[in-house]
Amino acid sequence: MYQPKIADEHIQQLYQWAKRLEIPMTRLVNRLLEHGIARLEQGAENVCEPAIHDYARNTKRTKRRAQYGTPERKSAGA
């Protein structure tokens, strides 16, 4: 089954919230997803649009790659 990578900054925030609420992170994530999916099913708008800071970060990264090239990956046998 597909398991998407969660951004590190979200993991840090989820950890802090779970600690404050004194619940496991998995329970917090499941509750947040349930709420978000319910909003989608009700026709909430702008749920899929990325936050402004995400766009700026991705744009900088894309520009940097274009300027310097994509870094080479080390092979497992090296």
Image (cartoon, grey):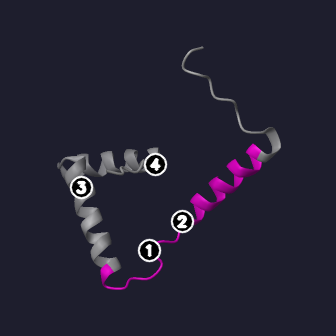
Farthest residue in the bottom direction?
Answer: 43
| Pointer 2 or 4: first along the chain | 4
Majority secondary structure of magenta residues? helix
In reply to whether residue 52 is colored magenta, the answer given is yes
Q: Position of residue 20 (x, y in %)?
A: 24, 50
Whole-number angstrom distance, CA of label 3 to CA of label 1: 19 Å
Whole-number angstrom distance, CA of label 4 to CA of label 3: 16 Å
Q: Residue at x 68, y 48 (%)?
A: 61
Which numbered circle lies on residue 47?
Answer: 1
Whole-number angstrom distance, CA of label 2 to CA of label 1: 10 Å
Q: Residue at x 65, y 58 (%)?
A: 56
Q: Nearer the viewer, residue 43 or 9?
A: 43
Secondary structure beneath disc 4?
loop
Secondary structure beneath disc 3?
helix
Whole-number angstrom distance, CA of label 2 to CA of label 3: 21 Å
| Pointer 4 or 3: first along the chain | 4
Q: Position of residue 28 (x, y in %)?
A: 24, 55
In the rendered structure, which amino acid carries the disc numbered 1?
Val
**Over which residues does the magenta segment extend?**
41-65
Which numbered circle lies on residue 51?
Answer: 2
In the rendered structure, which amino acid carries the disc numbered 2?
Ala
Q: Which residue is mark 3?
A: 28
Q: Residues within 10 Å of mark 3 (few under 14, many from 20)?
A: some
Looking at the image, is 30 positioned above or below residue 43? Answer: above
Q: Position of residue 64 (x, y in %)?
A: 75, 45
Q: Residues within 10 Å of mark 1 (few under 14, many from 20)?
A: few
The nearer-to-camera label among 2 and 1 is 1
Which numbered circle lies on residue 32?
Answer: none
